[in-house]
Amino acid sequence: MREELDALVLLLAGGIGSRLNILVGHRAKPAVPFGGVYRIIDFALSNVMNSDLTRVGVLTQYKPLSLMRHIGTGEAWDFTGRTRGVKILPPRTGEKDSDWYRGTADAIRQNIDFIESNPAEQVVILSGDHIYHMDFDAMIQYHRHKNADVTIGMMVVPKSEIHQFGAGIVNRENRIIDWEEKPRIPRTNLASMGIYVFDTDYLLSTLARDKKEIDFGMHIIPHAIEEDRVFAYPFYGYWRDVGTVQSYWQTNMDILQPGSGITPEQWGIRPNPDAEGLPMDRAPARFLAGCQVSGSMISAGSVIEGTVINSVLSPGVRVARGAVVRDSVIFEDCCIEEDATVDLCILDKRVRVGSGATVGSGDNLEEVNHDFPNHLYTGITLVGKKAQLPAGMRVGRNCIIGSGYAGRDVLTLDDGESLL
Amino acid sequence: MRKPSTLAMILAGGRVDELGVLTHYRPKSAVPFGGFARVIDFPLSNLLHSRIERIAILSQYRSYSLINHIGTGSAWDMIGRYRGISILPPFKDYENPHWYRGSADAVYQNLDFVRYHDPAEILVLSGDHIYQMDYRRMIQYHKTQQADLTAAFIHVPMSEASRFGIAEIEEGSDEGGRLLSYEEKPANPKGRWASLTVLCFKPRVLYEMLAANQEQDSGSYEFGRDIIPMMMERGCRVFGYKFRGYWGYTRTIDEYWQTSMDLLGPAPRIDMEAWGLRTNLEHRAIRDCQPLIVGKRGVLDNSMAYNGVVVEGEAHNSILFPGVRVEPGAEVRDSVLFFNTVVRRGARLDRVVCDVNSSFGAGSRVGRAESAISVIGWNNQVPANIRIGAGCTVYPRIDSDHWPAVGLADGEVLQ
């Protein structure tokens, strides 16, 4: 136990993340499985743990059950103990206010009582949606050193991507002197990572100022830079917002590339295998004679008889004899039956691909998904939780098959088509 | 909430000489097994699935590894109002100055603990065996027979029988029968029913027998050698319960290796997940491992490997524990590599069992196909390009200047 109370962490985990399509059909984006054994929020929680911060509130809103179950007591991230803890903070009705969280700042404002009951000099506000490794303690030291009111974690991104972010223009001292939220025409390439360190008193007075200010990027920060000391904390490592199917897939693939900069175990990222609530532990993965595996990550409990190339497999995946899995991300307990092929796909949990079926077939990666052209446009095919694909089925590129699909009649799904 | 009626006591004190360097610094029950677990996980998981959740572990030999492994007991759900694992180390007190002088003495010395829990049955188990068993069926049989003791037996080949406690069981029932004779490690075994060291006692009778054993003051305090024969002699109701499942014994290195190999193949003798095996994922923090990585040229063939493994070379017919690295060009065959073993470039291992935290230098050759198993103790850095033959034993922590340049001939021991 430390004498001085360390900063309080508020983790925003309520976003829908709707661009992840059916992957967020029954879970919040931070609870989406990632990298075989992790969920997206494990990165933020582990960074908090590895920064020696011990008090965390997780603000949930959208489909929180999966997330709550995953966080459990917080023991996986060492948040249990007399003065340590992780608390789930759902929206609630009170005497006066009764509302859903309307934005990032609004969500924090509705939890001022939590902040007041956990005294700390600084409050760290994070998003639970990002894949990265960062020492928040160093950022807090920087914040104190700069005598800042607010410090924002920022990194350089390609100018073509700046329109997705809050963009800051800084002076020589890294003080932010101008701010543009999701600018169409960029003036800078310095993007906000959605990581804020606030002086607690400053945060409380700012939130009290105007209840119509409901978003940090849109309202609070632009207002703050006019009058107060707002600094950028430059970050140079690997950081990804896995908010789109393409970036989600690419970030998974990055783990397979030596030198890509993402190394979850070395970073000290911790999963929470207990949260699955299995009656047994996953045994070591088994590789039967004749299997071929290359450039892949395979998790415990998997049984591989066929071929796995350049793919990420969660626990308990079965790849039968003659089956091929290539360039894909496969969630827990999927079963790829004999001679089936899965190519450039993301399969949610417990999908069964019948024998001889092909999911992700053909060379036409350009035919975007007809229902969600902004979600699937690079060739990736999505299959929802527990979907059962009949033997011999052919599924093209940029297709979506919904959760629980169990139809037996459709045996061909053309590029860009969906079965929802 | 149901108060448990059965108290299980696991005998986990033993060292088992034949396992050699694997048990220099840990008891047999804490020896790694199955690519991620420990031997004692098998009886503990059996207890879990039998819903016997009040457990004592009698531990004496280098207990730390075991204590660490048991942790709070939560890995087996054995934490709660009436659930728990108590580790009972030997102690001195006003009356007793001894170490545990045998399995029966260990239980005797802890009778106050046993009486406090006031069990309806006392289940005494060995912590050293690989098997899957629902103890509830045996306990039911024990109750039906109104037995003083029910012991589980398994059919073994006649050639092996003299290594075990051997019983003759009354004919007539597939389930079991009255014990007609019992001999511990007989030179001329009268049968093929070998004791699994799974013993269910009526508490009152057990207390009596343990006290009588102490009074004899013979210097021998073992369940197999002393207590069971004494109960037979005194005409107690002693029954044999016939167990017909798989029983992997791991008393020697060869057996350990063979039982490990039984995990491999399309239809393994032991399917750990189907059995419902649980281990403590906190131990060595294996819960925090990332999935295993297979490199572009990695090969995994008829092998098993847990999270945290990196395979860039080849592994054939082998078991790789978390943290094992097989570097490019290295080849591992018919081997069992414990936690954090590193096999450097171009090294080749055949029929090796290697304890934790050791490494094989680039280009080293250890063991030989179709030959006796070579065993490497923990925390060794096997030098690059060395030749180590078949059936060799390397003690833990050999100094770097102590390795013979010529290597080790077949059967040699380096200590």
Image (tube, coloured by chain):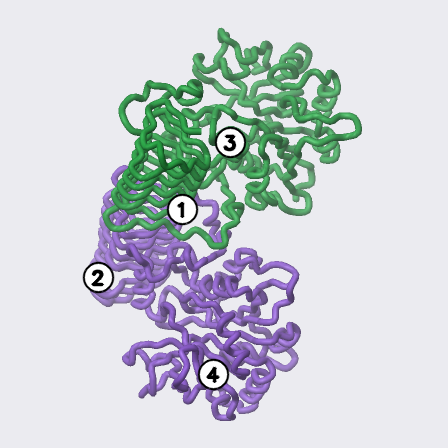
Q: In which quarter of the image is residue B179?
A: bottom left
| Colour that chain B carries in the picture | purple
For this orientation, the residue located farthest to the right is A95
User: Gap in Å between the C-alphas at discs 1 and 4?
Assistant: 42 Å
- The residues tagged by marks 1 and 2 sit, at their Cα atoms, a distance apart of 38 Å
Q: Quadrant of the C terminus of chain B?
A: bottom left
Q: Mark 2 lies on which chain?
A: B
Residue B386 appears in which quarter of the rendering? bottom left
Is the same chain shared between marks 1 and 4? no
Front disc: 4 or 3: 3
Whole-percent x and y of residue A406? 41, 38
Please give the chain letter of the residue carrying mark 3: A
Q: Do the residues labelled 1 and 2 touch (CB within 8 Å)?
A: no
What is chain A's hue in the picture?
A: green
Q: Mark 2 points at which residue?
A: B389
Q: Is residue A187 above or below residue B125?
A: above
Q: Mark 1 lies on which chain?
A: A
Judging by the rendered image, the residue that carries numbered circle 4 is B239
Q: Quick check: do tags 3 and 1 share a chain?
A: yes
Disc 3 + disc 1, Cβ < 8 Å: no
Q: Specify whether A181 is left or right of A377.
A: right
Give x and y (percent) for residue A146: 62, 21
Q: Name the residue under label 1.
A: A316
User: Which numbered disc, 2 or 4, marks the residue that appears first in the sequence?
Assistant: 4
Amino acid type, mark 4: Phe
Q: Name the residue under label 3.
A: A25
Dot 4 crowding, Cα within 10 Å, few <14, some 14–19, many 20+? many
Q: Which of marks 3 and 2 is in front?
A: 3
